[in-house]
Image: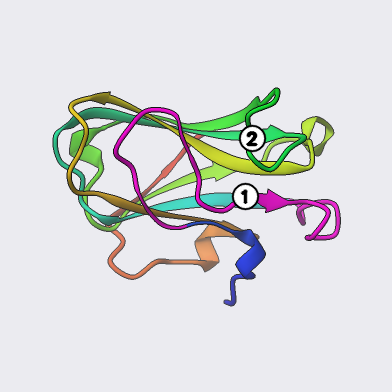
């Protein structure tokens, strides 16, 4: 399966501090105004994390690309403990109801504990996570809206 570059939210971010916004932001105006439903955000750990206690990853939406004017949380991968942030771990978040979408979408990271010195994640939008097995997968953890 091919992944459109406009739907690659995180090409491989190093999360070190609280409040980091994803490197890429999805612009619904550039993707035709909506996601194909149903769909999923898939996050994969591509380098194991160290030091932190937990990492929380929230899907947010806003009217501006910086995601800082009045962001609304659409969903969350939840609070993920360090022990789960191992190489190849996958986490899945169903795309929520389109009625609450603003123009731009991205991820916000919250680090609890000591800032990690290692750890990378990739996040993308896919139509079906079962069709998108990732190399090195250890598990898929599903989170609700």
Q: Quadrant of the C terminus?
A: top right
- Vertically, is 58 above or below 124? above
Please state if 56 lies on the left or on the right of 85 as rendered.
right
Q: Name the disc covering residue 67, or none.
A: 2
Please state if 111 lies on the left or on the right of 114 as rendered.
right
Q: Residue furthest bottom?
A: 2
Q: Taken as a whole, is the magenta stretch helix, strand or loop?
A: loop
Percent x, y of residue 18: 37, 28
Task: Tell me the residue at 20%/51% (across/down).
Answer: 48
Task: Tell me the residue at 63%/60% (across/down).
Answer: 7
- How crowded pointer 2 is (Cα within 10 Å; few <14, some 14-19, many 20+) is rated as many
Percent x, y of residue 108: 50, 34
Task: Verify whether residue 17 appears in magenta.
Answer: yes
Task: Verify whether residue 30 appears in magenta.
Answer: yes
Q: Quadrant of the N terminus?
A: bottom right
Q: Name the disc covering residue 25, or none.
A: 1
Task: Tell me the residue at 69%/36% (across/down).
Answer: 96
Percent x, y of residue 143: 49, 35
Residue in the foreground of this view, choosing between 27 and 33: 27
Which callout, 1 or 2, points at the residue further toward the start of the chain? 1
Residue in the foreground of this view, choosing between 98 and 51: 51
Which residues fall within the magenta stretch?
A: 11-37
Q: Are marks 1 and 2 in contact (CB under 8 Å)?
A: yes
Between the residue at mark 1 and the residue at mark 2, the CA separation in whole angstroms equals 8 Å
Asked if residue 34 shows in the view, the reply is: yes
Q: Residue furthest left?
A: 51
- Vertically, is 29 above or below 75? below
Q: Quadrant of residue 5?
A: bottom right
């Amino acid at each position: 399966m091919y992944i459109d570059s406009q739907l690659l939210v995180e090409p491989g971010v190093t999360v070190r501090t609280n409040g980091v916004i994803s490197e890429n932001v999805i612009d619904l105006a550039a993707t035709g105004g909506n996601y194909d439903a149903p769909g999923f955000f898939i996050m994969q750990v591509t380098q194991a994390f160290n030091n932190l206690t937990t990492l929380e990853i929230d899907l947010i939406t806003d009217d501006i690309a910086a995601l800082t004017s009045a962001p609304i949380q659409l969903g969350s991968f939840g609070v993920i403990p360090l022990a789960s942030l191992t190489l190849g771990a996958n986490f899945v978040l169903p795309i929520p109801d389109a009625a609450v979408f603003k123009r731009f979408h991205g991820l916000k990271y919250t680090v609890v504990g000591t800032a990690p010195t290692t750890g990378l994640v990739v996040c993308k939008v896919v139509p079906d996570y079962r069709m998108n097995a990732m190399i090195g997968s250890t598990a898929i953890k599903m989170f609700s809206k």
